Image (cartoon, rainbow, N blue to C red):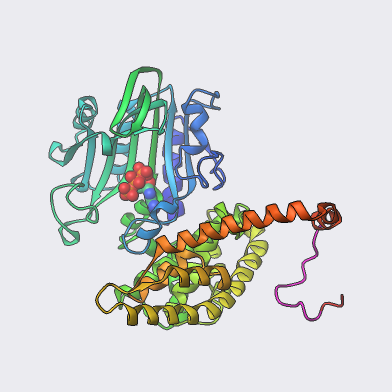
């Protein structure tokens, strides 16, 4: 089953069960406190909070998500993408725990030729919240093996929005990949063997005073109870397609193959280069999808996350030995793998790819200049630190940032690859000194200069700027 078919099967199933299917919302989060849409429930928050009336009481979706929190896991675990798709079914004051558990169990275990996913019940495990005997009894009534149930506390199996509002216990569903993948004993024994695929959240309480997951006050039962579930599409795909991880599924793997062709490395030969190829495949796809929703590289917010994804791709390919531009070979492959699910990529791709390739050109220039300086700083650190752990000075990290455009994350990553640490405290001190100097300079200037001379300049800047190419300044006639 292709990833797109797995998603369609989910939506068809819930449509048959009376759910209205909503299209995926943008990756740009409507919630001002998060940069990206991080879960399927995000577009439905006003309905879950009772602030707006939903178009239907039962809804389902396949939502595009980006989670930068998981960036360090990418390529190393089998199950974390920066971009992924979250399937979800939602009930706004309609059905509750019994139906939510029943639907999940039925869809997972119904044979493939009868519209389900055909998982062997023997390989499924669930966790439930300590006080939620009701959920355990529903699972047992569905025929679930009680020896495959784990009971967990507030930290793992209780959900809140992080503030006052709805909250409640959850029940997570896992697939056991088998003894060859790790320790026996259930989800909390080995997260590489037992893969979390679906989280069912039963919102039945009103909570306030939420200091942490374990320190909150339950005000009482909600009048309208909600169901909010999230199933990772790529995780389902890798398990159903018999692959080893999410990066080997049909929507991601073509980019690994392209990276193989470009670098001459064969996937599956060395863990180190495999991780790099998986990072490349993940980041290219995330960047493509984020840019298709309108984000462009910059030094702040979403644009900065995007810039990091693109730069990490370029660097990972360099570490695989490719010094030529890589994005023009990788972006079209990712687009082709994703366009069946997201036909809008065909409209956005021209603009998106031009911006991505321009970003790569600019970064390649930065890298050439900065890497030599970094290598000198690392050499100095290694010579200076015979007795202690070698440390790149904060001053060198600051010069790399200030003069060569190396963001601190890049210096940290490259230093780590060379086996040294960076004096981050000193770097941050120098950064804040620079900021306060800049503030004082600005104040001084404001007192001495007639700022009205800038007015015309500002107006010119507000006018549309003609695009003249990235490097072609020399041939301009003016
Ligand atoms: P994990 O602990 O495995 O990182 P999670 O507890 O953060 O997962 P939830 O927030 O409950 O996951 O998200 C619901 C579902 O979305 C998960 O059960 C999983 O299938 C999927 N999911 C979550 N994060 C990712 C990710 N980074 N990449 C791919 N799928 C994910």
Q: Position of residue 104 (x, y in %)?
A: 32, 37
Quadrant assignment, res 207: top left
Q: Is residue 416 magenta?
A: no
Nearer to me, 144 or 328: 328
| Prevalent SS, magenta region | loop
Nearer to me, 358 or 14: 358
Q: Position of residue 68 (x, y in %)?
A: 44, 53
Residue at the spot 61% in from the left edge and 74% down from the top edge: 361
Give the position of the C terminus as an image quadrant: bottom right
Left or right: 354 as drawn, with respect to 409 = right
Nearer to me, 458 or 125: 458
Give the position of the N terminus as an image quadrant: bottom left
Residue at the spot 41% in from the left edge and 38% down from the top edge: 13
Nearer to me, 68 or 242: 68
Q: How many marks?
A: 0
Question: Can the viewer see residue 393 in this picture?
Answer: yes
Q: Position of residue 357 (x, y in %)?
A: 61, 70
Question: Can the viewer see residue 115 in this picture?
Answer: no
Left or right: 475 as drawn, with respect to 391 = right
* Magenta part of the chain: 464-475
Residue at the spot 56% in from the left edge and 76% down from the top edge: 364
Residue at the spot 30% in from the left edge and 46% down from the top edge: 111
Quadrant assignment, res 326: bottom right
Quadrant assignment, res 299: bottom right
Give the vertical position of 219 relative to 85 (above or below).
above
Q: Position of residue 275 (x, y in %)?
A: 35, 69
Left or right: 160 as drawn, with respect to 343 = left
């Amino acid at each position: 089953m292709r990833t797109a078919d797995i998603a369609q099967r989910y939506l068809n199933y819930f449509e048959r069960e009376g759910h209205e299917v909503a299209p995926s919302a943008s990756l740009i989060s409507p919630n001002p406190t998060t940069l990206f849409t991080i879960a399927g429930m995000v577009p439905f928050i006003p309905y879950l909070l009772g602030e707006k009336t939903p178009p239907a009481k039962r809804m389902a979706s396949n939502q595009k998500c980006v989670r930068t929190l998981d960036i360090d896991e990418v390529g190393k675990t089998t199950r974390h993408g920066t971009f992924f798709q979250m399937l979800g079914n939602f009930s706004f004051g309609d059905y509750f725990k019994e139906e939510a558990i029943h639907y999940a169990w039925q869809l997972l275990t119904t044979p493939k030729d009868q519209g389900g996913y055909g998982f062997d019940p023997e390989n499924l495990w669930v966790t439930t919240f300590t006080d939620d005997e009701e959920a355990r009894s529903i699972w047992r009534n569905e025929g679930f093996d009680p020896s495959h149930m784990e009971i967990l506390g507030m930290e793992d199996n209780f959900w809140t929005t992080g503030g006052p509002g709805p909250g409640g216990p959850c029940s997570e569903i896992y697939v056991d990949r088998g003894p060859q993948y790790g320790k026996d004993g259930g989800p909390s024994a080995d997260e590489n063997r037992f893969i979390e695929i679906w989280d069912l959240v039963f919102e039945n309480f009103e909570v306030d005073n939420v200091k942490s997951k374990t320190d909150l006050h339950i005000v009482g039962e909600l009048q309208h109870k909600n169901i909010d579930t999230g199933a990772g599409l790529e995780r389902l795909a890798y398990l159903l397609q018999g692959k080893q991880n999410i990066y080997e599924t049909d929507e991601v793997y073509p980019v690994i193959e392209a990276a193989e062709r470009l670098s001459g490395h064969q996937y599956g030969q060395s863990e180190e280069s495999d991780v790099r190829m998986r990072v490349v495949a993940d980041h290219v796809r995330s960047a493509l999808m984020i840019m298709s929703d309108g984000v462009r590289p910059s030094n702040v917010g979403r644009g900065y996350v995007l810039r990091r994804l693109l730069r990490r791709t370029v660097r990972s390919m360099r570490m695989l030995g490719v010094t030529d531009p890589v994005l023009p070979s990788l972006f079209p492959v990712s687009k082709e793998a994703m366009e069946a699910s997201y036909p809008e990529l065909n409209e956005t791709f021209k603009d998106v790819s031009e911006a991505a390739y321009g970003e790569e050109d600019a970064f390649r220039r930065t890298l050439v200049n900065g890497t030599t300086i970094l290598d000198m700083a690392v050499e100095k650190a290694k010579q200076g630190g015979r007795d202690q752990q070698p440390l790149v000075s904060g001053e060198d990290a600051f010069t790399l940032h200030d003069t060569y455009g190396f963001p601190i994350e890049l210096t940290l990553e490259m230093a780590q690859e060379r086996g040294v640490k960076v004096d981050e405290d000193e770097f941050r001190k120098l950064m804040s000194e620079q900021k306060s100097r800049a503030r004082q300079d600005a104040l001084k200037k404001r007192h001495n200069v007639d700022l009205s001379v800038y007015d015309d300049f500002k107006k010119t800047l507000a006018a549309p700027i003609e695009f003249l190419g990235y490097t072609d300044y020399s041939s301009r006639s003016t």
